[in-house]
Amino acid sequence: MQRPTIKTIAQETGLSIATVSKALKHSPQVRPETRAIVIEAAERVGYELNMHGVQLRTGKTYQVAAIMTAPGPKQNEWEGVEYAQLLSGISWALEDSPYRVSLYAVRNFEESQAVIKQIVSLKKADGIIISGTRADDPRIRTMQAADFPFVTYGTSIHNAPHAYVDADNEQMIRVSMARLVERGHRRIALLNPLSDLSYGITRLEAYKRALEVAGLAYDPALVAHGRLTPAFGRENVLTMSELSNAPTAYICANEASALGAFSGFHERGLVHGRDAVINATDDLNVSQYFAPPITTYYLPISEPSSLLGAYILRRMEGEPPEALQTLLMPNLIERCDDRLNPNR
Amino acid sequence: MQRPTIKTIAQETGLSIATVSKALKHSPQVRPETRAIVIEAAERVGYELNMHGVQLRTGKTYQVAAIMTAPGPKQNEWEGVEYAQLLSGISWALEDSPYRVSLYAVRNFEESQAVIKQIVSLKKADGIIISGTRADDPRIRTMQAADFPFVTYGTSIHNAPHAYVDADNEQMIRVSMARLVERGHRRIALLNPLSDLSYGITRLEAYKRALEVAGLAYDPALVAHGRLTPAFGRENVLTMSELSNAPTAYICANEASALGAFSGFHERGLVHGRDAVINATDDLNVSQYFAPPITTYYLPISEPSSLLGAYILRRMEGEPPEALQTLLMPNLIERCDDRLNPNR
DNA sequence: ACAAGAAAGTTAAACGTTTTTATCGTGCAT
DNA sequence: ATGCACGATAAAAACGTTTAACTTTCTTGT
């Protein structure tokens, strides 16, 4: 048996397909009684809207493109794993809408740029969600120039206002630094994301300001930028711990680099809490299982991801981007006292 | 300016839209010279196929549905993180095809069943990729009954033959057990996935057989089934290590539960390599950063994921499922000698 | 020389919607 | 009574593509 269409309903009710279409869309042009008849018939025959017809007619795709930057297949490092949760959160936020998440996996920034240009010019989606924003992000400019709805996970610095969701990195670093200074730390290392990423810059600046406030000197040797893999965390601990004036605290930008930092501790024979401490930001609630559990800023990734979904929906409905900007403050979870060991 | 269509090309070349369409599809009905003219004109005007027209006309969606089971937003445990890599691998495998990955996040098995029924009956995709297969999986039956192309990540046991990709769990456990027995272990714990999952059963049976071969008794107290979170690993170590005859080796089904097992070691004051050892399966290459690094079976997730993509393409082209079945053997990476401590 | 058949194009219909425009009563003011 | 506006529905066109059916032209075998 064929799948029922509005034509089926038209025949069934004796109405025209135009009326059926309008009735199903709750158009004020059709009488409530007529609508009731249509709805009844639609349910009786098991009608479901065929999106292909809609898409062709209206030009809308009902797709939200999620651009996911993941290192290539040969790149076997633990990175970007939080993307799974991010995607499912977005997907759930769109659940009650006609929109679907369409995945675009890219290998690097350039590829994401190309993909976005394509989506915009060929209208392969109605909205775009990107992450890994840069201070001055050309992708944002592309989408803004075309007046294309989008939301970013991460702020930008030099772009015109746009919809975004991000963790409050400035506040996080500020509070984090004050807390460590208060506990006696004078040499605090910052394991930061790539320096062209917007939140890398935000964190670095907050870090410098916090040093200033505490009357401490800025030492470039204590700051590292890189892809936030365990390898990155490990290697920087290996290097920095050999400094004549080694750090007594490491602030890691995510849980992967924190895990790697632990690996560096183990390699060097450092004991957490005695020789130095590790603090981290954690999206995945995993650092509670480290040995020992560490102090982290925890932002359940479901929060930003569902916001991203909600925002792209509202953005596609025309809401101005200025109303769709949120900085989320992660919860500080203190699992260690993190004091500088006095008898060191 | 409007986006060019085949009509544009028809006007440009003086041919009919039918000929243009056929030429672009390399139909034998059109002369090579004519085709050349069409191709040239298409490139000149910057023509790109409008999929909506195709979809409406042919009924094909050019979408591959990836069903991703992830616990709900409130469920803040580190689980299913390998899905990000899995998805990007699939996405890359489809890169040169007209197909796109469409994401369907579901919360549990029942929901995945409902979603699949919907996709099949409303033809919301041309192919489906699922994971978390059960011994007798009703979703597989649904898709087979409708003759719908699909590939599973994970085998099934009682279903009719279908396309799948999986790790060779039987061999993995067999070799793993033999190796531990050879190193003196007599009490080996198995931290297994949920018992209704196909690979949970495979692993358990292989485990029992290995015990038999080694002449060891099967002790149910050493086997646990559950969602493979760190919490699961931790809790089982906490419990099992209190047994009068505690295990000296733990085989963890993934890296998350292995991390949790370490957390349990730390809590109980157990030292890895002295009191007991942990072995694991690791998709993400992360257990090298544990302290100490542990012995794992490593299967880079890019391998199964690109196979899944390739298989669904071939399956959608009508290739029989029997030709699309692969068990991948992970690499054993020995990072500890894992011998039972003699002076224990 | 001519019918038959192949080769290469064209015409037209169809896929399922939405939306603009047209039609047709009906009630109301003039 | 006549014209008019209005409310409700119908008719028809359009979105971009594929494909079955048809036409025209050219080969080819007898």
Image (tube, coloured by chain):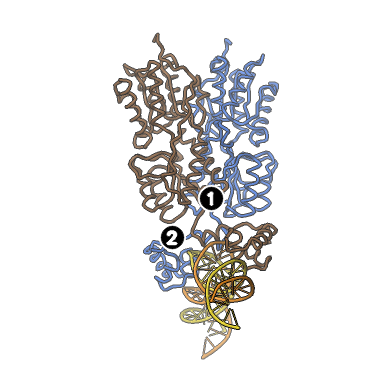
Chain colours: A brown, B blue, C orange, D yellow
**Whether label 1 touches label 2, CB < 8 Å:** no
- Mark in the foreground, 1 or 2: 1
Q: Position of residue B113 (x, y in %)?
A: 65, 45
Q: Position of residue A36 (x, y in %)?
A: 66, 59
Q: Residue at x 61, y 31 (%)?
A: B227
Q: Residue at x 45, y 55 (%)?
A: A123
- Determine if marks 1 and 2 fall on one subunit: no
Q: Is residue B43 above or below residue A167?
A: below
Q: Residues within 10 Å of mark 1 (few under 14, many from 20)?
A: some
Q: Is residue A127 above or below residue A294?
A: below
Q: The disc labelled 1 sits on which kind of residue?
A: Tyr
Quadrant of image for the C terminus of chain A: top left
Residue at the limit of the structure toward the top, as seen here = A343
Q: Nearer the viewer, residue B159 or B128?
A: B128
Q: Residue at x 44, y 73 (%)?
A: B15
Please indicate whether residue B137 sits to the left or right of residue A211 in the image.
Answer: right
Marker disc for residue B48: 2
Residue at the spot of label 1? A99
Q: How many marks?
A: 2
Secondary structure under tag 2 reads loop
Can residue A23 be seen in the rendering of this structure?
yes
Q: Which image quadrant is residue B308 in? A: top right
Q: The disc labelled 2 sits on which kind of residue?
A: Glu
Q: Residues within 10 Å of mark 2 (few under 14, many from 20)?
A: few
Given the image, what chain letter belongs to the residue carrying mark 2? B
What's the distance in space between the residues labelled 1 and 2, CA to CA?
23 Å
Q: Residue at x 42, y 46 (%)?
A: A321
Q: Nearer the viewer, residue B13 or C7?
A: B13
